[in-house]
Amino acid sequence: MSAADTHDYDEAQQLIARTVREFARNEVAHGAEERDATSQFDYGLYQRLGDLGVPGMLYPEEVGGSAAGTLAFCLAVEEISRVDMSLGWVLWVGAPGAVSMLRGSQEQRDAWMEPYILPMVRGETVSGGGITEPDAGSDTAGAKTRAVRDGNEWVINGSKIFISNAGMENCAFVSVLARTDDGFGLFIVPSGTPGYTMGSPLKKMGLRSADTRELFFDDCRVPSYHLMGGSGSGRKQVVGSGFALTRIYLASQGVGVAAECLDLALERARTRVAFKRPIGRFQYVQGMLVDMYVELESARMLRDKAARKHDARQPIVREAAVAKLFCTESAKRAADSAVQVFGGLGYMDETPVSRYYRDIRAATIAEGTSQIQKHIIARELGVMG
Ligand SMILES: Cc1cc2nc3c(=O)[nH]c(=O)nc-3n(C[C@H](O)[C@H](O)[C@H](O)COP(=O)(O)OP(=O)(O)OC[C@H]3O[C@@H](n4cnc5c(N)ncnc54)[C@H](O)[C@@H]3O)c2cc1C
């Protein structure tokens, strides 16, 4: 069941879903297992995704993008994630990083256009976002990394942990949340800046070809115009608008993984014979497949609702939290059921379902855990006091 075959997407969105699906099936799928086994990222593959125009979908035409919109980008993330969740992760974390740079001052846009914005639109570079610290994850306000103004520069000291993309060889910069005298600032720290170093890639349960590291800032100096948005607005940018959007992208990974798990499980249920009949004839197996389908349909509607509201320039904090919570939790259940339908084979690396089971586990933790999404939804419902 392709996104292009279901639901009321417009012609342009259907074309994007079909095109990315074809690319995913023809160019991404066959190497996914090997990349997972070796924890290697394929930079050429990401560039080909760039040539296809996928990273540029969120950018306006004047910088070489296609302004395809949030829902269209979500459909692309979904199709990539159906075959390789690591690549989908690098994409949604890494490609939108320069969008907010376009909202900067003229001085900032001029300075950032050639080194950061244009290469990211073309898929030559990615970015990372450094929010989490060893002692401050869900509680972003507890971040201790500090930025102090010194003439025309900011001096950053502290560390970040579990940061996606920052260690990749095509990573141009990381956006770092740091405490300032008037609250928090969000700072652009280019890769290679003196005083900015990182640890080795962290060894993960899944998402193995996506890079995750600890970052260190030791008297790291960036120009004063590398402060994004207004002074003191860093946390608001991240916790408010930033996370809401990335939650919809991550929800799309959930939709993709759940859709693929369902297709694989359906095929297995039709062909695997036990007690002289296909296992799909057994009601307990049917129950798993039906639950997967109903949850997938519900997840897609919630993701689409949030993305469409964003495309209509409406607030999405509540919808994004609902979509993120349901799409990632239901995808986790779908991967679990797929392993169950496959039986012993599902536990082996010979089938992709075991990879999906490991990969999707991160989705209910990153970009705000499921518990934090419930906290946000309760606040939106006005029951937080
Ligand atoms: C694969 C991966 C990639 C990541 N990439 C990035 C990245 O690129 N950039 C980045 O900044 N971070 C990244 N993270 C970090 C991620 O955002 C944090 O792990 C997450 O926000 C949770 O923070 P924590 O790990 O400190 O857990 P904690 O905050 O310590 O939470 C531990 C447990 O307590 C619960 N809990 C905490 N507070 C509350 C509360 N108020 N109410 C109810 N329950 C609560 C949590 O839900 C969780 O179950 C990544 C994580 C993973 C796994």
Image: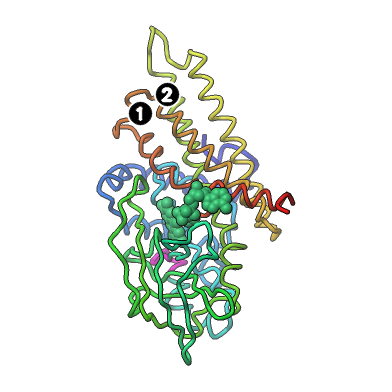
- Find residue 346 and name its label: 1
Residue 22 falls in which quadrant of the image?
Answer: top left
Q: Is residue 219 above or below residue 186?
A: below
Residue at 55% x, 24% y: name it.
290
Q: Identify whether 350 is placed above or below 247.
A: above
The secondary element bearing badge 1 is classed as helix
Percent across and percent down for residue 101 are 53, 73
Residue 53 visible in the shown view: no
Q: Residues within 10 Å of mark 1 (few under 14, many from 20)?
A: many
Residue, x 56% and y 59% (percent of image)? 243
Q: Which residues are magenta?
A: 120-127
Residue depicted at 36% across the width and 39% down the height: 355
User: Mark 2 touching mark 1, by CB under 8 A?
Assistant: yes
**Cβ of mark 1 under 8 A from ligand 1:** no
Q: Tell me if 120 is positioned left or right of 101 in this view.
A: left
Q: Position of residue 246 (x, y in %)?
A: 54, 56
Crowdedness near tag 2: few (<14), some (14–19) or many (≥20) residues, C-alpha within 10 Å:
many
What distance separates the C-alpha of mark 2 from that of mark 1? 7 Å
Q: Is mark 2 within 8 Å of ligand 1?
A: no
Image quadrant where one finds the C terminus:
bottom right
Type of the residue with mark 2: Val
| Label total for image | 2
Q: Is residue 254 magenta?
A: no
Q: Residue furthest left?
A: 38
The colouring scheme, among rainbow, by chain, secondary structure or one colour, is rainbow
